[in-house]
Amino acid sequence: MGAMRGEDTRREPDETRNRPGRINRNFFLHIHAARVHLHSLRTDYTFGLGIILGFLFAVMILTGVILLMNYTPSVERAYNSVKDIVFIVPGGRYIRNIHRWAAHAMVLVSFLHLVRVFFTGGYLGGRRLNWVFGVVILFLVMFMNFSGYLLPWDQLAYWAVTIGSNIAASFRELTDVLGITQVLDIGGFIKRLLIGDENVGQPALSRFFMLHVVFLPVTLMVFMGLHFWRIRKDGGISRPPDSNAPKLSSWPLVMWAELALLLMTVAVLLCMAFLFDAPLRQEANPAFPENPAKSPWYFLGVQELVSYSAFAGGVIIPLLFLAFLVSIPYVDREDRFTGIWFSGKQGGRITWQSALFALTVTLVLVFIFIRYGWLKNWFPAIPRVLVMLVNPATLSALLYVAWAKWIGDRTGSTRMSAISLFTCSLMGLVLFTAIGIWFRGPNWEFYWSHAQWPVF
Amino acid sequence: MKHQNETGQTRRDFLKRISIWIAATAGILASASLLRQFVPRRTLHQKRYKVGRKSDFPVNTFTYLADRQLYVYRDHEGIRALSAVCTHLGCIVEKSEQGFLCPCHGSCYDRDGHVLSGAAVKNLPWYAMYRDPDGQIVVDQGRLVDPDQKLYL
């Protein structure tokens, strides 16, 4: 007893000196587990994507709060207040640029994170629910971006949200076919709920401001909390079950790793914001859209899809994709290959075969569409339903599903089936987005390069 | 002493259950009435408005009225009004050789507003027109008419 008390007194000065470190550590260990698997620290496994997303979100909040001080959410003032931020507020342009690039990075990193977790089987075992939280976060991030770009009230803002709200209203295409639009106008209801009127105006701006600044960030925080909490509950991030790698003390190893990622993330953002200005077009003009009216790059895939059909491309296919993502961990119940890239050799082979299949199928369909026209050009009297339901996007999706079914039958494995469908969808998404970004010009016509665009 | 009925339910069980039901009903009704605030009840969108006098519109031309997103066509007999809002996703269609072309996703319409190609599934609507007692021409977006129906002037 006496000896122990002696020890305590000897340690005391040391403890006092370490107190800030201890408090730090306590907060740090409040979020992290005390011990961590060596495998979880491998950068070629996680690439740090999840933690980068967390940092990006922190940057978004910080820069967002700064921007809020000079922004006015009114139709008369919004555009000019953003102009003030860019041209008058000291450093305002820089803060806005950081906000912009962090937002784009969030979309990109969310998708990469999804891909990483999928291909390493990170959704298996007890992690099924956390995968669903992750999908919710992905869609919240997309919606955050969508609500954010109405706020500057420039031409891009106005027409992107007009198009977006009319995609919601395209349920009318379905109810028209059924002949019940007069009784049950679901599309019109969703549109009015979203933008508060028949056309984009002050109610839309107020609603999107509320969504962007209050509702979505808070919801995102809740889901991020759930996501992190599940990681700890599930025993850390996924790893091969047989890995006998030693467990290490999180402090200070994980702290250094995360600090490095934070510095890297911030450094990249600062450089991007310094080099590239966030665009601000002309003030919103409801009388004339821009030509071409292109949304930011991450929505150009959907924009390409809606150029085939509003309802099929803007509602059916995104909903099917969402349903597929959510259902993955519940359809694939094979608890093998957790933490192994592509579930081993067979999965790797199926991944690149599926990518090649999707590439070919979609390119051929799009080639026919662009070169020879489509049903309406060939059979002018064709029924509306066929115009709506048969197009390169829906046919691609159908062929992807058939391919995944065939793979599933051939290998007898739901995992391989899931890998092939996921790879195909991803390939399709990348392809349609690339077409939208680089090969579409005025009137949404096909051009090999921007240099061929006609001059008005 | 516990009061039980034939099924073994005590008075306390009954009170507990009924208070949960009452609270749930009150909660649902309150939320429903609050959620109604999200549904807009007033619109800035005008369905009937004056577009000007006959002399404002040149003959045999589609005149674009920017603030109404409307094309007005006048010929030697009369005048007609065509919506300029693409039925696909709401952009404004431009005049083209065949008729009209949407810059956003390339839907084509002929001069009567019928879909020629593209993702649009509905034709551009023609609106009814009237003459106001003060001599101005009125467009009524609430009433759709056939492409050949004119307001004779």
Image (cartoon, grey):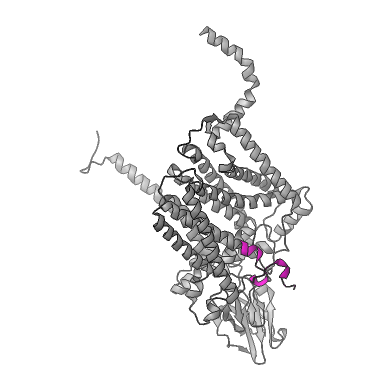
* Spot occupied by residue A54 in the image (x, y as percentages of width and height): 60, 43
**The one of A386 and A348 positioned closer to us in this rendering:** A348
> Residue A197: which quarter of the image?
bottom right
- The answer to whether residue A196 is seen in the rendering is no
Residue B46 % position (x, y): 61, 72
Count the numbered circles shown.
0
Q: Please name whichever residue, A37 or A267, is drawn nearer the observer in this view of the structure.
A: A37
Q: Quadrant of the C terminus of chain A?
A: bottom right
Q: Foreground residue, A376 or A279?
A: A376
Residue A73 can be seen in this image: yes
Farthest-out residue, top: A2
* Residue B16 higher or lower than B121, as above or below: above
- Magenta range is A434-455
Question: Does residue A436 belong to the magenta stretch?
Answer: yes
Image location of residue A239, percent across then percent down: 49, 40
Q: Is residue B74 magenta?
A: no
Residue lying at the far left of the rendered structure: B6
Who is closer to the viewer here, A273 or B145? Answer: A273
Asked which quadrant contains residue A157, the reply is bottom right
| Side (left or right) of A244 relative to A293 | left
The image quarter in which residue A410 lies: bottom left
